Image (cartoon, helix red, strand yellow):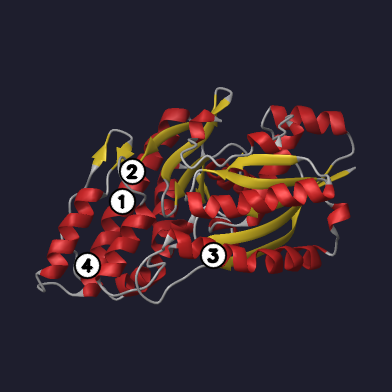
């Protein structure tokens, strides 16, 4: 028996279409496993990613939404072609219902509703943050990890504990990715700025002291951003050294709270998710921490770290097996949908 889902991702600058398929011999056993959050067997048949980027400045929600509208039909066609199937072979349509940028979420939700109604397929709205955790479990050997989720708008330490998804630490102001992007704009880098900051940081040689803000299990980036902006404006420091110092400081903060979550939960697996997790220096620091405490680090390949439709399609299958169905009249977007509300 198999279950195939087409998932639509549109929370921010990425419009993605993913097609996932779960295979099982006993549907009752699959339902029980899904309800217990146990690991299911599945595969990704297609993962088409279309990203809105700029050469200067940041993401403008209305322009990103226009981009999503422009690429929507092409992305769907490419995904179906890559998976070598047609819409009649799709069993479920899932979409990122939140959290995210309203302009962008609406495009994905509208596309999902249309496909669901026209092709008479069940509709399932899913939480974007949780999809990063579940796609990581599918594609790595992780079974019960702590997720360090670091993206543009989101910075959270998430785990499934005592029967529900829980946030063990998070940013108190902005996401680490947004903070990096804002500094990148100031030094003349386009969007997204994280990859360029990583390149500049690799050439940095001198550590410049910055605020280190960890409050219990939470982190804060606003003061760090203000401080480094002032340092840049003073013209006393080079871009490379500032980028190097920024990465070293904020990544150390993230590794600290992730390690504390491992200690608190007693778990021995750390999973990375989100676009910032593509940064090789962050991966290296997490790897060192895990090695020192006898834990295992799992890092999905880049196309599954960044926002993508595959994660939405796979979570759509898991939610469907748990009995989730989203009526069209209940499919309004949820821009502020928290992980621990699921």
- As rendered, which of 316 and 117 lies closer to the eye? 117
Lateral position of residue 276 relative to residue 49, left or right: left
| Mark toward the viewer: 2 or 3 | 3
In this figure, which residue is indicated by the disc labeled 3? 66
User: Looking at this view, is 27 or 322 the one in front?
Assistant: 322
Q: Residues within 10 Å of mark 4 (few under 14, many from 20)?
A: many
Are discs 4 and 3 less than 8 Å apart at CB? no
Answer with left or right where residue 325 lies relative to residue 338.
right
- The residue that disc 4 covers is 242
Q: Which residue is mark 1?
A: 252
Cβ–Cβ under 8 Å for marks 2 and 1: yes
Of 245 and 285, nearer the camera is 245
Q: Which residue is mark 2?
A: 256
Helix, strand or loop status at disc 4: helix
Residue mark closest to the camera, 1 vs 4: 4
**Residue 158 in the image, given as x and y percentages of width and height:** 48, 37
Residue 301 in view of the camera:
no
245 w.r.t. 174: above or below: below
Are discs 1 and 4 less than 8 Å apart at CB? no
Task: Indicate the quadrant containing the C terminus: top left, top right, bottom left or bottom right.
Answer: top right
Query: Nearer the viewer's eye, disc 2 or disc 4?
Result: 4
Identity of the residue drawn at 37% across and 68% down: 193
CB within 8 Å, label 2 to label 3: no
Decide which of tag 2 and tag 4 comes sooner along the chain.
4
Label 1, residues with CA under 10 Å away: few <14, some 14-19, many ≥20? some
Picture quarter containing residue 248? bottom left
């Amino acid at each position: 028996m198999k279950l195939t889902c087409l998932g639509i991702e549109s929370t921010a600058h990425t419009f993605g279409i993913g097609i996932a398929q779960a295979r099982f011999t006993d549907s009752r056993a699959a339902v029980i496993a899904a309800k217990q959050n146990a690991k299911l067997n599945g595969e990704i048949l297609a993962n088409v990613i279309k990203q809105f980027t700029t050469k200067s400045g940041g993401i403008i929600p209305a322009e990103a939404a226009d981009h999503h509208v422009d690429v929507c039909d092409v992305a769907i066609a490419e995904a179906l072609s890559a998976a070598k199937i047609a819409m009649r072979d799709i069993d479920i349509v899932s979409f990122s219902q939140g959290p995210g940028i309203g302009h962008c979420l609406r495009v994905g939700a509208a596309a999902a509703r249309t496909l669901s109604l026209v092709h008479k397929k069940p509709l399932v709205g899913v939480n974007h943050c949780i999809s990063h955790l579940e796609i990581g479990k599918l594609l790595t050997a992780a079974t019960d990890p702590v997720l360090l989720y670091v993206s543009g708008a989101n910075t959270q330490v998430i785990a499934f504990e005592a029967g529900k998804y829980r946030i063990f630490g998070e940013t108190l102001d902005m996401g680490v990715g947004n903070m990096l992007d804002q500094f990148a704009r100031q030094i003349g880098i386009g969007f997204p700025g994280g990859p360029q900051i990583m390149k500049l940081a690799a050439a940095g040689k001198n550590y410049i002291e910055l605020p280190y803000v960890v409050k219990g299990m939470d982190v804060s980036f606003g003061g760090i951003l203000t401080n480094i902006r002032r340092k840049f404006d003073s013209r006393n420091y080079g871009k490379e050294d500032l980028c190097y110092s920024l990465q070293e400081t904020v990544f150390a903060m993230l590794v600290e709270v992730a390690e504390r979550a491992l200690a608190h939960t007693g778990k021995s697996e750390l999973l990375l998710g989100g676009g910032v997790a593509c940064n090789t220096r962050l991966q290296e620091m997490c790897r060192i921490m895990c090695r020192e405490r006898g834990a295992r680090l799992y890092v999905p390949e880049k196309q599954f770290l960044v926002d993508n439709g595959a994660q939405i399609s796979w979570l759509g299958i898991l939610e469907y097996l748990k009995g989730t169905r989203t009526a069209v009249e209940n499919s309004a977007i949820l821009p502020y949908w928290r992980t621990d509300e699921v």
